[in-house]
Amino acid sequence: MSLEFSNLGVRFGTEKNPFWAVRSADLTIADNEFVSVVGTSGCGKSTLLSVAAGLQDKSEGVALINGHPIDGPGRDRGVVFQSYTLLPWLTAAENIEFALREVGVAKKERKDRTAEMLNAVGLSAFADRYPAELSGGMRQRVAIARVLSYRPTTLLMDEPFGALDALTRQLMQELLVTIWEQTPMTVLFITHDIHEAVFLSDRVVVMTNKPGRVKAEIPIELPRPRTHEMVRSSEFVALQEEVLGHIRAETLQVEHLV
Amino acid sequence: MSNTLTHTRPVAVETEGPGKPRRRKPAVLRLDGTINRTQGLVLSLAGFALILLIWAAVSAAGVMNEALLPSPAGVVGRLGEQLANGEIWGDIGVSFMRIIAAFLLAAVMAIPLGILMARIRFFEALLVPLSEFIRYMPVVAFVPLSIVWFGAEESQKLFIIWMGTFFALVLMVVDDVRRVPRELVEIGRTFGMSDSRVLRRIVWRGALPGIWDSLRLAMGWCWTWLLVSEVVAASSGLGYRINLAKRYLDTELIIGYIIVLGLLGLIIDQLLRLAGKRLFKYLGKGRS
């Protein structure tokens, strides 16, 4: 499925004292394309994702999914957040079954799909653990298994690995990229980690701050499948530098370092 | 003076020397220290024993008239009589039924309303300021009115206990429900769940551990309002018996019943705490 935003604006605050989280944002994501949006904190990138998910109403402009206006959340778009993603009173398996039930998967199919997805993220042995008994990385793996279990055509991820330690994050990126390369989907991936964005994406979009709009788009023409050996290649480093170049001036300004 | 100095100096050097560890306070006395089971039990019992000892000493010394301050033995004896003649069971039974009825009424109203008030702006604006206002009206001031309205009937007790519990409880439920992370609600919506389904299957369930704790607190308030209502107008129950005993200066029974009230409150609270611990085991450690 394709996603399309044009002249998108999201306003918070009052009529008199408006605050535009996103304004005049234009972005198109093609079917089965993996696009990351990077930007400084508060640049409205998460708001953009909320609009795509149908969780946040836009104030102006156009937001389309497959050419149709986005009108509320839908089962075609799966979302993964940074934290509080699992229902704490349900085990890993029950969390997946809960989602499958709510999206309307037949009862006899739920068990099989749950087992299959837990296996895909390597957590079969942890099916009966509660979220409190899982590590942060495991929790996000269950969240990914859960969202993939009902086969959405678009995946919306809001800094899904942002709360993980560096090593776990790297492993999660490899897991995600492998899954995506096997079964392509349209992905909108929000992050502030440039390395992560370059590693995963077909295209990296840089957003500016206040109001958030699209400043630059950098195509990532690294070969697939992506491996972690690539990150030391000169191409990878050059791409990372290019993205950083767009974002650096902005960050200095936001952090009052200039 | 100089003698003291020469005496203390080497000691100070010694304690800070590398080989010999500095003497530390025992863990039970340290800031955020630790305690083992035996120490905990002994200290808890010591607290009770201390009060009992002071009480026994004061009454034995005869500083206060025995009719006003009976001895611990006298109180225990009087409670024994009440147990033997069975009166106390009737008193506890009547009071307990009143508490349960009023508590359930308050809870059954406060939980759904609290959920709506916490998450739907319409109900928040309509009912939160109102509840906050009523909560600050002293419930005791409603007691005369309750007698005018309901007489000394059961409904009068129900009204006072409910009044003292519901408005504070509903606001606590609101807080508990607000603490359910927004992300969980949004995840539910992405599954295509309707608002009412999200409220029932995610928000209510997610707030339940917090609501459970609020209910425990509310149960404690119920005892207070029960006694208030029973002392002023009742012909049965623990509060009635205490009020009756006042007429005969039966302080042994008054103090005995006060202790029984404390014990009943403690037992119910501990039962609820243990039930909560079992129900919400999934939250892992860090929850007592």
Image (tube, coloured by chain):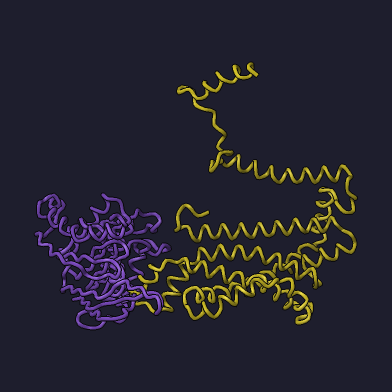
Chain colours: A purple, B yellow
Left or right, B282 with reference to B104? left
Please indicate whether residue B109 sits to the left or right of residue B164 in the image: left
Query: x%, y% of residue B173?
Result: 54, 69
In this rendering, would A178 be left or right of B11?
A: left
**Along the line of sight, the residue nearer the viewer: B191 or A124:** B191
Task: Identify which residue is drawn at 34% across, 55% down.
Answer: A136
Q: Quadrant of residue A74?
A: bottom left
Q: Is residue A67 above or below residue B264?
A: below
Residue A62 at x, y percent in the picture: 24, 81
Which quarter of the rendered picture does the N terminus of chain B lie within? Answer: top right
Q: Is residue A49 left or right of residue A241?
A: right
Q: Which of B14/A2 is in front?
A: B14
What residue is shown at x 49% (from left), y 81% (from top)?
A: B122
Q: Position of residue B129 (x, y in %)?
A: 57, 76
Is residue B91 at all visible to an observer of this figure? yes
Can you tell which quarter of the image residue B18 is in?
A: top left
In the rendered image, residue A32, in percent from the top left (x then y), is placed at 16, 71
Q: Is residue A1 visible?
A: no
